[in-house]
Image (spheres, coloured by chain):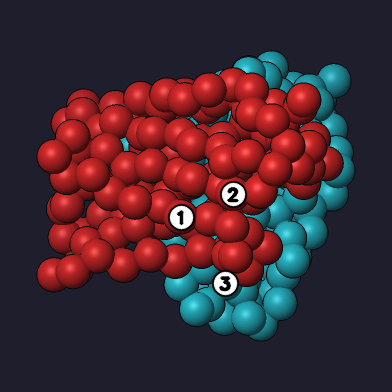
Amino acid sequence: QVQLQQSGPGLVKPSQTLSLTCAISGDSVSRNSAAWNWIRQSPSRGLEWLGRTYYRSKWYNDYAVSVKSRITINPDTSKNQFSLQLNSVTPEDTAVYYCARDILNGDTEWGQGTLVTVSS
Amino acid sequence: SALTQPASVSGSPGQSITISCTGTSSDVGGYNLVSWYQQHPGKAPKLMIYEGSKRPSGVSNRFSGSKSGNTASLTISGLQAEDEADYHCCSYAGSDTYVFGTGTKVTVL
């Protein structure tokens, strides 16, 4: 049974960096056929795919154009987890953030969600 | 940009409803890679349909998916109270990116 457990602060100040971690149990971040995603949801923007990391003999990242200049998703094989960093946040980045495996095939799994508020 | 869904759809118990998800030839119309998610308040989305029309194990056969041109559709037949939730479509959008729909609130009257 795969589980994704999210952790990270729920409050971030404007202009600072939002950092979240998604710990994986029951699967491997390095599995050659999986992709590990970050998605966020806000009342104004709905669900928004942010990016993903995956391993296919080497590590790859793909990012949404809307956040490409500010986002980094990194795998951590020693802890079997992956992380999200979003720089220079504004109140517009306030949302529930989800990590998820493989969002377009039948093997998807999602984390529990983390509400992150950007406020001073 | 986000795929277009109706803001709300409603139906009576036992009826069938259909939710549309309209994109472009660069996303919905270009690939057979549309998923549908159900989301109850305060919960993470749950996969109901993937690759346009496939149901994951455990999902009721009252849920079905289809596509015509640039529009994907989710049909819920035999509507039940527990189907009241938000529904979101998601499509591959080329260049290794994905796009979600605007979301639809389903109300069971």
- Quadrant of image for the N terminus of chain B: bottom right
- As measured in the structure, the alpha-carbon distance from the residue carrying label 1 to the one carrying label 2 is 9 Å
Circles 1, 2 touching at the beta carbon (< 8 Å):
yes
Where residue B52 appears, x then y in whole percent? 51, 61
Where residue B61 appears, x then y in whole percent? 47, 38
Give the colour in which the image draws chain A. red
Q: Nearer the viewer, mark 1 or mark 3?
A: 1
B86 displayed left or right of B98: right
Question: Are the numbered discs 1 and 2 placed on the same chain, yes or no?
Answer: yes
Task: Name the residue: 29% across, 31% down.
Answer: A23
Query: Taking A64 as reference, is A114 above or below it?
Result: above
Q: Which residue is mark 3?
A: B93
Query: Taking B28 as reference, is A33 above or below it?
Result: above
Question: Are the numbered discs 1 and 3 placed on the same chain, yes or no?
Answer: no
- As measured in the structure, the alpha-carbon distance from the residue carrying label 1 to the one carrying label 3 is 20 Å
**Marker count (numbered):** 3
Identify the element where label 3 is drawn: loop
Give the colour in which the image draws chain B. cyan
Nearer to me, A22 or B78: A22
Question: Can residue B90 be seen in this snapshot?
Answer: no
Q: Nearer the viewer, mark 2 or mark 3?
A: 2
Q: Which residue is mark 2?
A: A87
Nearer to me, B23 or B16: B23
